[in-house]
Image (tube, grey):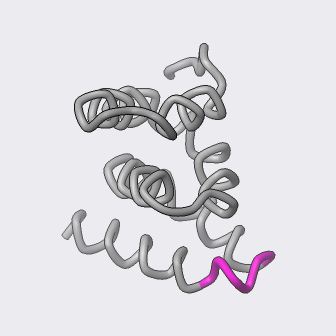
Amino acid sequence: MNTVLVPISEYVNKLENADNNAKVKIENELVNIGKDAVPSLVETLQVVTGRTRGILAMVLIRIGESSIDYLKKAAKTNSDFEWIAKYLIMEIQGAAA
């Protein structure tokens, strides 16, 4: 099991001003953290916008099946997030097929 040594919020803060190379590196680092990062990623995804939101969504898709339960829970408690969660779940399940 991976341990989250750097809070997800620090990665998100770095994304705000990162160039494309740095964004790819941050995305890969988050994917490498894996399922341990999922709860914080889903929580953060509900409040960020723009390119940062897109990157975090891609991270969750790349992490895969471990993201689905957290996305479903978030969709139940946040109706504004429901369509995003459903879309990401569809993408994850499509990638796994």
| x then y, percent, for residue 2 | 50, 20
| x then y, percent, for residue 96 | 24, 63
In the image, 28: left or right of 38? left
In the image, 77: left or right of 23? right
Which residue sits at x=51%, y=29%?
14
Vertical placement of residue 71 versus 29, above or below: below
User: In the depicted view, which residue is nearer to us: 21 or 35?
Assistant: 21
Q: Which residues are magenta?
A: 77-82
The reply to whether the magenta stretch includes residue 73 is no
User: In the depicted view, which residue is nearer to us: 22 or 72?
Assistant: 22
Kindly indicate the quadrant of the structure image that contains residue 26: top left
Which residue sits at x=23%, y=30%?
21
User: In the depicted view, which residue is nearer to us: 18 or 57?
Assistant: 18
The reply to whether the magenta stretch includes residue 78 is yes
Point out the image quarter for the C terminus: bottom left
From the image, give the main secondary structure of the stretch colored magenta: loop
Vertical placement of residue 82 versus 17, above or below: below
| x then y, percent, for residue 19 | 31, 34
| x then y, percent, for residue 92 | 34, 66
Which residue sits at x=56%, y=37%?
12
Total numbered circles: 0
